[in-house]
Image: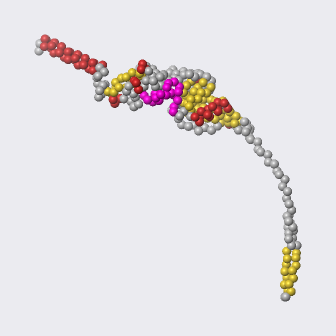
Amino acid sequence: MNRSRLLMIGGLALAVGLLVSFYVYSRLRSPAGPMSGENGAPVVVAAGDILVGTKLAETDVRQIMIPKSAVPPGSFSDTSQVKGRGAIWPIGKGEFILKSKLAALNAGAGLPSMIPQGMRAVSVRVNDVVSVAGFVQPGSHVDVLSTGNEGAGNERQTTTVLENVLVLAVGKSLDRNASSDAQTAPVITLAVSPDDAQKLALVSQEGRIQLSLRNPMDTKPGGVGATRSSALYPGAPVASEPKPKIHKAAVKVSPPPAPSPYEVETIRGSKREEDKFDAPIPQQ
């Protein structure tokens, strides 16, 4: 085989390789490629980082094509389906827009859209100690403790009033601090049931509250009883409730009635006699 034939075969193989590479490249870049029609499905994703409480606009989302088998449940196929809805969870750039991360239709944006159905948002005043040195952030779960005077002995005690309560906002911030640094604010807003909202309002007025930060994976109820100040000092006398005074009433005892006399009948032949005798007086 001469040299010219080898060069011709090599050039032909190179040309075929270039044509195949160009075809594959154009198919991958084309919107009508393997991810369209029967092979793909449209899905809405975030065009950028979306903060909690954001009302979604056209510029916040975009549509991409992915294989039908990779479409996650609860996703949207068109950007018009999510326009105007509020984000209740932070969404990163490129993440799927899911129903679980958005507020209900016509729920608006901001804090109202983040309140779960049937729940109420209640704010409590805190400081660095009450808010666990500022590490209580939106999305955290806390227990609410109350300390006050209880009982007839006016003894101080601490009671866990509410357990596993969701923190909606710290001050005016609805977003969790991405750097996990302390986030301090004078007010913290909690999501509670209507009944727990009344309890929280009462303990905020009657006693001093304290927040106890929970691990988000720990959802088991604590079932802890109240702790009294006497339990901290076992040797100290325990204040007891005063016993009620018993007043003895004078009871007038009347003498027993006099016994009635009794009769004895004696029969001797045809003669019949009756004798009366006084009953003996019983000894006291």
Q: Residue at x 81, y 48 (%)?
A: 247
Residue nearest the observer in this picture, 135 or 100: 100
Q: Farthest residue in the top direction?
A: 4
Q: Determine if residue 165 is in view.
A: no
Specify the principal SS of the magenta part: loop
Q: Residue at x 79, y 46 (%)?
A: 245
Residue 60, horizontal then vertical, whole percent:
43, 20
Image: magenta residue range: 96-117
Tell me the quarter of the image containing the N terminus. Answer: top left
Q: Residue at x 58, y 29 (%)?
A: 122
Residue 13, horizontal then vertical, whole percent:
19, 17
Residue 126, placed above or below residue 276? above
Q: Quadrant of residue 224?
A: top right
Q: Quadrant of residue 197?
A: top right
Q: Is residue 16 left or right of residue 203?
A: left
Q: Is residue 211 magenta?
A: no
Q: Residue at x 51, y 20 (%)?
A: 179
